[in-house]
Image: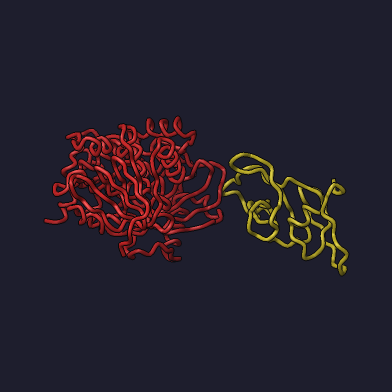
Chain colours: A red, B yellow
Amino acid sequence: MMTAANSSSSADVTVIGGGLVGLAVAVGLQDRGLQVAIVDEGDIALRASRGNFGLVWVQGKGDTCPPYARLSRMSAQRWGAFAAQLRAATGIDVQLEQRGGLYICLTEAELEHRRLLLEAMRTALGGDYPFDILDQAALRAKVPEIGATVAGATWGPEDGHVNPLLLLRAMAQRFADAGGQLLTCGPVTLIEPGNGRFVSYAGTQRIESERVVLAAGLGNRQLAPQLGLFAPVVPNRGQVLIAERVRHFLDYPTGHVRQTAEGTIQCGDSKEDVGLDCGTTTEVLATIARRAVTMFPLLKEVRLIRAWGALRVMTPDGYPIYEQSTEHPGAFVVSCHSGVTLAAAHAGPIADWIATGAADPNLSLETFHGQRFNL
Amino acid sequence: MANDSTFNRLATAPATSVTLWIEGQAVKARAGDSVAAAVLSAGLGPSRTTPVSGSPRGAYCMMGVCFECLMEINGRANTQACMTPVEEGMQVLFQQGARQPGEALV
């Protein structure tokens, strides 16, 4: 498949993948004075960044992995400044709202299970993990439209949501305005390490750089071994259901339903292992709709507008992969399924790690090495 | 107001006349017309303001694609008026911004 490259460029860092993960890392690297090229597959990419739910989410994340809980929380805490920075640079308001979020539990058993999970997390994190358990009455006080049969909810004060499409656009614009090269030239097929440099090939493009960052989502699986890295990511499908714009009624995002700044209702949170199929099924969409109406009965007569499937980038344990290659220093892998929540971390401390090669020890990045799946 | 319309009916075969109520005003239409056609030929509108910017809109594509013609028809908000045939006594209201979710249906 290799053809002679007829277009050549160079940069300090090549980022493979121009989705939310690659763009966030790239703008962070630009802030640290580096010249960055992003090689992006283009519109044919299986792009989770276009299909995701838009939550900036803390509660319950990392229930079996305290470093992931800390990473998610740290990123959420940096999100306000990150959104303000994007707005100042691009004029784009990514519609960040971070006034807390709800995980709604339909049954008492579900609520109890969730309470135990969050309490265990608080213990594992030395007591520093804010959440509240809301019974039906307390939940109703926050959301008067809640269904009468709902048991309650857990409340995460640091949770929020953004418009993920505006986030993608804002970061792309910020990247281009700062002089970044966005090369849309099909999938990267080969990365050659040698003499402390990396040459990446995509279509007829050849890009040479001192560092390379794999942020290619599901594509990382094939690319990582070329650099002595391991990223056994697999697709996990989520289906999303969109209803028409209605008058604002929901002040907080929930794990299953949110209302966007324009009034659109977005419902989701299905999980399926169906390979590279990003289609939808009536059965799953019906379950999503039924759950949404149980939570918010006023949605019963609201019209559905569209639906889609999108593929999460999942590791076997659900946690991210951050690793620098020991075989080829200067090659990094960044894989996660929470490109929205973690965007602020990726543009901040993760970009620091890639720029300097030294990670802040508080990030516990050794926890996230891909080699953990190779034991 | 009805005389302001720039939409004029071409001479065609006669059809039954239907009376519907648009914003409380009795309007005559022809059986088989869409509600959007009845609104336009009566010279009424704009028939909604958008949920996001509040700018005024009227029916545009007349074939179910653009969703500019959303109106409250017989109590049902956000109905595509260009895809809804007129009926005797039909109640049509213009919309301001986003619909209220959960509003009572007739």
Depth check: give the residue in front, B97 or A197: A197
The answer to whether residue A156 is seen in the rendering is no
Residue A137: quadrant of the picture: top left
> Where in the figure is residue A349, as x and y percent of width and height?
26, 35
Image vertical order of residue A162 relative to residue B20, above or below: above
Please identify the residue farthest to the bottom as the structure is shown.
B13
Depth check: give the residue in front, A137 or A80: A80
User: What residue is shown at x 34% (from left), y 44% (from top)?
Assistant: A37
Residue A33: quadrant of the picture: top left
> Where in the figure is residue A17, as x and y percent of width and height?
34, 50
User: What residue is shown at x 45% (from left), y 40% (from top)?
Assistant: A173
Q: Is residue A30 left or right of residue B99?
A: left
Depth check: give the residue in front, A272 or B11: B11
> Where in the figure is residue A217, as x and y percent of width and height?
31, 53
> Where in the figure is residue A138, as x and y percent of width and height?
40, 38
User: What residue is shown at x 50% (from left), y 40% (from top)?
Assistant: A261
Question: In the rendered image, which quarter contains the N terminus of chain A?
Answer: bottom left
Question: In the rendered image, which quarter contains the C terminus of chain A?
Answer: bottom left
